[in-house]
Amino acid sequence: MEMNLSDPVMAALIGASATMLGALIQLRLSWRKELKERERGQPITKKTRRGPVIFVFALMIAAAVGGFALSEYFMSLRNGDRDTMRAELQSKLSEISASAARLERARLAERDKLESGVLRAEALRRGEEGIAASALVGPCKSQGAAAPGSRPACSEQSAVQVAVCARVPASAIVREVLLFTRFEDAQQPWDEARVLAGQDAGAARFVDAWFERAQGNESKEICQHFAHWNSQKGRSARILVKYTL
């Protein structure tokens, strides 16, 4: 690990080291001198005794200074570690945030894909079953004379014409258009009331071929013209459009 020490800490360490080294050398010399004097039987003076005490005191000062410098060094290391940990934590938080954002985008994309698949499956199912539309057409009104107590008859030339339209997706490919008609008060099932285009259904018929017209970008209408010239009863006209996508 690279040691980056400030100038005050470096000066304190150098001073403490020099003081301790000098004190240890002097203490060793003093002890050797005292041992020699004892061997020769010379009395130990107060000055001789005071020497080691001074050196020990110097060692204590040097140790205090060194301890202060070492404490400052450890404090700088701890502050450096704190900054490093803070930077690493911030980096991890950024990574977690980015991962969460990616997961959210993936979840939304998957949901959109799933919803699109469900909608497409539903559209295909409806296309197989067919989209129905119907219209109710009232009796025609003729301008000709009629016998007393009866309504005047109509002709096909004066028939009421309507367009029966079913809305399908804009991308739909029409497979077939089924046609049905019955009197407005009939209880006949629709399956039994099926007719073909151009077929006379009793003063009523579907005319021409089916056609389509746009209804914005999402849908379109499939339509079939229906003509009715019965002056006595109204009729219901129904189409069933089957398609694929």
Image (cartoon, rainbow, N blue to C red):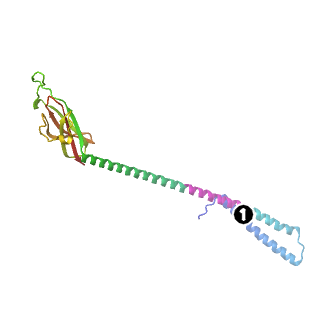
**Residue 89 drawn at (x, y percent):** 54, 55
Q: Is residue 59 visible?
A: yes
Q: Is residue 69 magenta?
A: yes
**Residue 160 drawn at (x, y percent):** 15, 31
Residue at the (48%, 54%) spot, across then down: 96
Corner quadrant of residue 4 = bottom right
Nearer to the camera, 3 or 225:
225
**Residue 206 drawn at (x, y percent):** 15, 38
Quick one: SS at disc 1?
A: helix
Q: Is residue 11 visible?
A: no
Q: Is residue 164 left or right of residue 122?
A: left
- The residue beneath circle 1 is 16
Residue at the (54%, 57%) spot, across then down: 88
Image: magenta residue range: 64-86
Corner quadrant of residue 209 = top left
Q: Please identify the quadrant where the N terminus is shown.
A: bottom right
Residue sitting farthest toward the bottom: 40
Q: Is residue 138 magenta?
A: no
Corner quadrant of residue 67 = bottom right
Above or below, 116 against 193 in this view is below
What secondary structure predominates along the stretch shown in magenta? helix
**Residue 147 drawn at (x, y percent):** 9, 22
Residue at the (57%, 57%) spot, across then down: 85
Few, some or many C-alpha atoms within 10 Å of disc 1 (few <14, some 14-19, many ≥20)?
many
